[in-house]
């Protein structure tokens, strides 16, 4: 017998608009169901719990494997869950993969099953749903958690004698019992899942816009304060910025940000006074849960941030997790630090030098302010890997000193460990960089920038592109509207040859993002639409001023058969990275390797990132590629 049961959503954190769906269960067996029989949202929540557990966070390839299996099954693409497809899509094997010669899929599947058993026997033992991969198959199944069943004793001589005429009654009781169990599991599921919250850009009420940087950076600081609270998943600043200065509907904003609650408010700064109004709104019914007004001196800005965070926590009935250190710094130092952060967030042109200046000034005002050292180290690391190469000789020693000083001042500051990861990657110390980034993730699992930098500068640069994509998925979950996240995902998927999927991420970038044209054009080349790619890049103003952009244009010219244009661009260029791309398009391996070798002057990770590009794929079988990889510290 099969019946459909659709219990109503019960009490618990109100769901955002995008997740308000009925929980529909087809009764196949009291315990075992396929993924599609349960609500897809519930399955994905369980998948997120698995992938953020320590055992999976430390193994990106296993995480990618599990996500691939579950997502394809939920999409109804069971026919793709076979060894040959998995080998290519997940483990990067060639299209002519032979499972008889390479047992990678079977080996990793066995490890995955063992890890799932380990997880559900320990930290996941009370989860309402269990995801399993049956032995000998790759189509995952989901099981509702078993609850001990007590059979009441029966009296009288008829015990054990079947009563056919009452079977219908037992059927009704069984269905009703399952409905109650499912309702209970639904309540447990929604009460256990992290609450998603987004902080919309605070509105600057000052007469002029000169204080916008302070208001934007203050928004970012509130996001950071909330991100270290257990039970909260906080959307990053870059996603929230999409709503800056725009009228918004609460439910629509909550749906786009995939948030259950929104924090919004305004700031009025006048001389040394601050007035901040803030409120928390439940997305599901547009009801304000809490509001506060803070009319203080500017010097009290840290106390105001703490009170806002505590107000949110108390009104959502959450427990405080590991705490955030309270920094007692001067108003001048904090103001300089915020302005530097605002410059970095702009992502227009080469902003690192201006940001570096602000962070150096902040440290001069307060030599004990750890976040300023961490921000300085990150800015130095990115700046030192830029073209042209006429950088200050003290950049490299300064970046490491700043990162190590940040950790010495605050060993629990996630940004400090992420900064050290960037520094290690800049120097080609790949193992140390990975260790630093994983420590940063342990300290703050909501910081999307950590996932992005780890994926781009360590995993992607070292050729672990599949792991990089899975790490970027975690960044996307916390920062769904970030153009930078969509760009990095697009480039990494293109490196795997998944051009259609890459194109979807390029399309999600904000229209005014300076790198959107490059993202789309690279995908078009991969799709064989080379003439379209050329037109996109020729019409893009940023491409004309950016060496990497010009390199992609020259590469497109070469692929389109316009060799004279490409050769002229290469010979006129002063940038090794631009030449490397153009000569790769022309098929001139000698000049491509020469240009790549000259690129080592800006650090191993820049070369490592370029040789992972899909444009360099034809060179990977060349013996010189092994030598180049060895020179930049790659296996």
Image (spheres, rainbow, N blue to C red):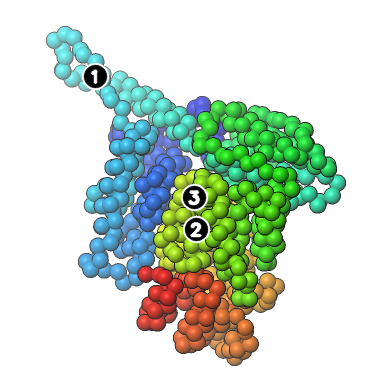
Residue occupied by mark 2:
421
Cα separation, mark 3 vs mark 2, equals 9 Å
Residue 173 drawn at (x, y percent): 33, 21
Left or right: where does residue 382 sit relative to residue 116? Answer: right
Visible in this render: residue 68? no
Please give the label number shown on residue 440. Answer: 3
Residue 258 drawn at (x, y percent): 57, 44
Q: Which residue lies most toward the left here?
A: 157
Residue occupied by mark 1:
151
Contact, mark 3 vs mark 2 (Cβ under 8 Å) = yes
* Label 3: how many Cα within 10 Å (few below 14, some 14–19, many 20+): many
Residue in view at x 15 percent, y 17 percent: 161
Contact, mark 1 vs mark 3 (Cβ under 8 Å) = no
Residue 340 drawn at (x, y percent): 69, 55
Dot 3 falls on a residue whose secondary structure is: helix
Dot 1 falls on a residue whose secondary structure is: loop
Nearest the viewer among 547 and 36 is: 547
Cα separation, mark 1 vs mark 3, equals 50 Å
């Amino acid at each position: 017998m099969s019946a459909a049961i659709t219990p109503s959503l019960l009490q618990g954190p109100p769901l955002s608009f995008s997740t308000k769906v009925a929980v529909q269960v087809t009764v196949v067996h009291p315990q075992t169901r396929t993924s599609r029989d349960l609500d897809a949202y519930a399955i994905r929540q369980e998948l997120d719990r698995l992938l953020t557990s320590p055992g999976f966070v430390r193994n990106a390839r296993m995480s990618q494997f599990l996500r691939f299996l579950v997502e394809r099954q939920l999409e109804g693409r069971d026919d793709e869950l076979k060894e040959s497809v998995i080998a290519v899509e997940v483990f990067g094997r060639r299209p002519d993969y032979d499972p008889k010669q390479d047992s990678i899929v079977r080996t990793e599947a066995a490890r995955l099953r063992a890890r799932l058993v380990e997880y559900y026997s320990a930290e996941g033992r009370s989860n309402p749903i269990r995801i399993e991969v049956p032995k000998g198959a790759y189509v995952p199944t989901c099981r509702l958690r078993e609850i001990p069943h007590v059979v009441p004793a029966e009296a009288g001589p008829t015990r054990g004698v079947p009563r056919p005429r009452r079977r219908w009654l037992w059927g009704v009781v069984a269905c009703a019992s399952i409905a109650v169990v499912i309702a209970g599991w639904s309540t447990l599921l929604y009460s256990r899942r992290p609450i998603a919250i987004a902080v919309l850009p605070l509105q600057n009420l000052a007469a002029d816009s000169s204080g916008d940087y302070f208001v934007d950076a203050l928004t970012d600081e509130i996001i950071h304060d909330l991100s270290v609270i257990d039970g909260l998943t906080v959307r990053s600043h870059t996603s929230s910025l999409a709503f800056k200065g725009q009228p918004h509907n609460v439910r629509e904003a909550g749906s786009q940000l995939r948030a259950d609650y929104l924090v919004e408010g305004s700031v009025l700064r006048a001389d040394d006074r601050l007035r901040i109004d803030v409120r928390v709104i439940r997305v599901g019914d547009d009801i304000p849960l809490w509001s506060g007004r803070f009319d203080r001196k500017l010097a009290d800005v840290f106390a105001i941030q703490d009170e806002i965070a505590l107000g949110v926590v108390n009104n959502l009935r959450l427990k405080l997790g590991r705490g955030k250190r309270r920094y007692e710094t001067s108003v001048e130092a904090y103001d300089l630090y915020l302005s530097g952060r605002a410059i970095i967030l702009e992502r227009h042109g080469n902003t690192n030098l201006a940001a570096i200046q602000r962070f150096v000034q902040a440290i001069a005002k307060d030599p004990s302010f750890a976040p300023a050292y961490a921000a300085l180290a990150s800015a130095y690391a990115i700046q030192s890997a830029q073209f042209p190469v006429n950088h200050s000789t003290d950049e490299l020693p300064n970046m490491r000193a700043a990162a190590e000083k940040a950790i010495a001042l605050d060993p629990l500051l996630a940004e400090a460990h992420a900064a050290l990861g960037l520094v290690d990657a800049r120097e080609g110390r790949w193992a140390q960089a990975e260790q630093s980034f994983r420590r940063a993730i342990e300290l703050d699992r909501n910081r999307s920038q950590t996932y992005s930098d780890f994926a781009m500068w360590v995993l992607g640069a070292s050729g672990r592109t599949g792991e990089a994509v899975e790490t970027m998925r975690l960044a996307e979950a916390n920062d769904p509207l970030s153009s930078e996240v969509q760009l990095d995902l697009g480039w990494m998927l293109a490196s795997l040859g998944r051009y259609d999927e890459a194109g979807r991420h390029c399309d999600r970038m904000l229209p005014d993002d300076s790198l959107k044209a490059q993202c789309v054009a690279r995908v078009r080349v991969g799709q064989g639409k080379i003439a379209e790619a050329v037109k996109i890049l020729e019409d893009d103003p940023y491409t004309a001023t950016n060496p990497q952009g010009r390199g992609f244009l020259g590469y497109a010219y070469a692929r389109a058969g316009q060799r004279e244009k490409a050769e002229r661009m290469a010979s006129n260029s002063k940038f090794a990275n631009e030449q490397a791309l153009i000569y790769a398009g022309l098929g001139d391996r000698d000049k491509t390797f020469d240009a790549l070798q000259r690129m080592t002057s800006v650090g191993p990770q820049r070369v490592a990132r370029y040789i992972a590009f899909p444009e360099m794929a034809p060179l990977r079988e060349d013996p010189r590629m092994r030598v180049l990889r060895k020179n930049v510290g790659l296996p």
